[in-house]
Image (spheres, helix red, strand yellow):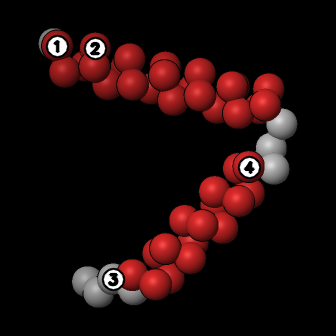
Amino acid sequence: MTFEIAQIIKSKQAYRAQLATRPVAEKLRMLEELRKRALAIAASRRK
């Protein structure tokens, strides 16, 4: 497996720029979804 670092960085920058244009309410919704996933992962590790 080879990694094209320049392509990865370019892709990350494009994704961040796209996120920056989203409304705050949508960003908060996305953050809440990430929090739910993190809680689910943490709960599954405790079992």
| Mark 4, residue position | 20
Residue in the picture at 32% in, 25% down:
41
Mark 3 / mark 2, whichever is N-terminal: 3
Mark 4 / mark 1, whichever is N-terminal: 4
Give the Cα separation between the discs numbered 1 and 3: 34 Å
- Mark 1 neighbour density, 10 Å: few (under 14) some (14–19) many (20 or more): few
User: Viewer-nearest of labels 4 and 3?
Assistant: 4
**Mark 2: amino acid:** Ala
Q: Are marks 3 and 2 in contact (CB under 8 Å)?
A: no
| Mark 3, residue position | 3
Residue 44, position in %: x, y? Answer: 25, 19
Please identify the quadrant where the N terminus is shown: bottom left
**Mark 1: amino acid:** Arg
Residue in the picture at 59% in, 28% down:
31
Give the Cα separation between the discs numbered 2 and 1: 5 Å
User: Viewer-nearest of labels 3 and 2?
Assistant: 3
Residue 8, position in %: x, y? Answer: 47, 75
